[in-house]
Image: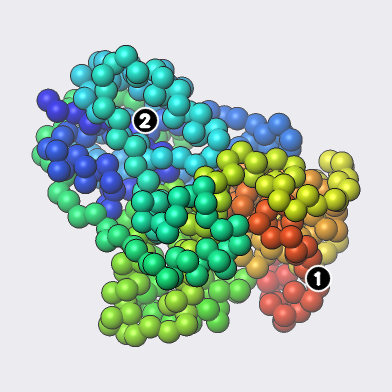
Amino acid sequence: MNILLHWYRNDLRTEDHAAFAHAAEKGMKVLPLFILPNEEMFGLSKLPRLGKHRKHFLLQTLKDLADFWEKQGTELLILQGKPEEIIPQLCLKYSVEELSFAAAHASEELAQEDAVHQALKDDKINIFKFYDDFLIHPDDLFCHPSQIPDVFTNFRKRIEANLIIRAPFVYEFPQGYPHHEKGISLEQINLNENSFVDTRSAFPFFGGEQQAQMRIQDYFFINKYILQYKETRNGLLGADYSTKFSPWLGLGAVSPRQIYAELKKFEQQHGANESTYWLVFELFWRDYFRYILIKYGRKIFLKNGLNIYNPNRDVVKSDALFQRWIQGKTGDDFVDACMHELAATGYMSNRGRQNVASYLVHQLKLDWRLGAEYFESMLIDYDAASNWGNWAYLAGVGNDPRQRLFNTQKQAEQYDENGEFRKCWS
């Protein structure tokens, strides 16, 4: 049997997927694998890398994925351990001819890929590595990723002058799948659908590909919220002030190409406006931070970041201040409300994120990486490039020398004029 072992990473979907298009073209049977991350702690903040909200959203996404594969007549194999140990064993056991996985961009994940390559170097396994989480594929970029402009505006203008966005993959899954061992069941990981639900949450949705597709249809075609996106995107309360696509994008339960294709379909039916453009603009930002991560590698995780502008800033070392920020006990009612929301739901508005980050960096003068680590632990829409890129950008150690200092009280007056958000999360 011609078997493709697909190692799921942050590509937890079945539609518009390079590996499955590849398998369909070659007539290969798919053995789907997901390797659970180990329970790791950060060195700087001592926080769990996969906090309770992120873990819960991941498990919901895996459940949705497992349901799909069960309907196909096979099982999503879930294991825990080191990929470089697990994958060669499976390749040998099931006579796998080819391994596929989505390319990573962060240093630790790249090291993981290298370890898998080394473990398989003598096994004559074909490896299909693909880039599947971009709007603009690296092969269609105006230059090599190592040469992209450091300033976003220059990047965007070059992109728009030579815009190439591929259509989503369309394929049929082959019939018949290899029988394989039982893995870890989701019940063993204690998935509880009712865990961590807060009725005040601006993200009252579940993880998984089906939920992502339902949200796209609702936001674009049913309620047409997209037509007011630019005007409402700085909102603070409710599910519909912004698209809320980011948690599904973060795990790859939907691709940016799918969102773009549906947006173009919407524009054909209902017309384009500044708001529909602005969503594409935000997807450009998402790609930009991925390319910056590819260009600079692990520098984005260092104290001085990309070290382009060499900022000279004294850093306070105070666990007490950091804990006050985390717990929403800073005394700044807007910052505290935002932090309460994050702790309770694993989600925070973009406006809130900029303000709490500015407060940690400029008011508390703490190491910006503490904030980035906390967001990584807590945010259900975490992805390495966007999270660390945005934090470095705001802290002045990324791609912009300007010090982005927010007056949080003026921001509260502008975006929470009646105090409804602060009252809700006081």
**Is residue 234 positioned above or below 200 on the image?**
below
Which residue is at the front of the view, 143 or 30? 143
Q: Residues within 10 Å of mark 1 (few under 14, many from 20)?
A: few
The tag earlier along the polypeptide, 2 or 1, is 2
Left or right relative to 96: residue 140: right
Q: Which colour style is shown?
A: rainbow
Q: Where does the image place residue 125, in percent across and percent down from the top left?
A: 27, 23
**Is residue 410 positioned above or below 363 on the image?**
below
Q: Residues within 10 Å of mark 2 (few under 14, many from 20)?
A: some
Q: Which mark is residue 78?
A: 2
Q: Which secondary structure lies at badge 1? A: loop
Residue at point 55%, 35% (across, down): 107
Q: Where does the image place residue 290, in percent across and percent down from the top left?
A: 51, 51
Q: Which mark is residue 407?
A: 1
Q: Are marks 2 and 1 in contact (CB under 8 Å)?
A: no
Left or right relative to 308: residue 274: left
User: What kind of residue is marked 1?
Assistant: Asn
Q: Which mark is residue 170?
A: none
Residue at point 61%, 38% (across, down): 298
**Is residue 145 positioned above or below 83 on the image?**
below
Q: Where does the image place residue 236, in percent across and percent down from the top left?
A: 62, 71
**Is residue 408 positioned above or below 107 on the image?**
below
Question: Which quadrant, please, contains the C terminus?
Answer: bottom right
Q: Which secondary structure lies at badge 2? A: strand
User: What kind of residue is marked 2?
Assistant: Ile
Q: Can residue 231 be spotted in the picture?
A: yes
Left or right relative to 338: residue 408: right
Left or right relative to 41: residue 248: left
Q: How much space separates mark 2 and mark 1, taking CA atoms?
A: 46 Å
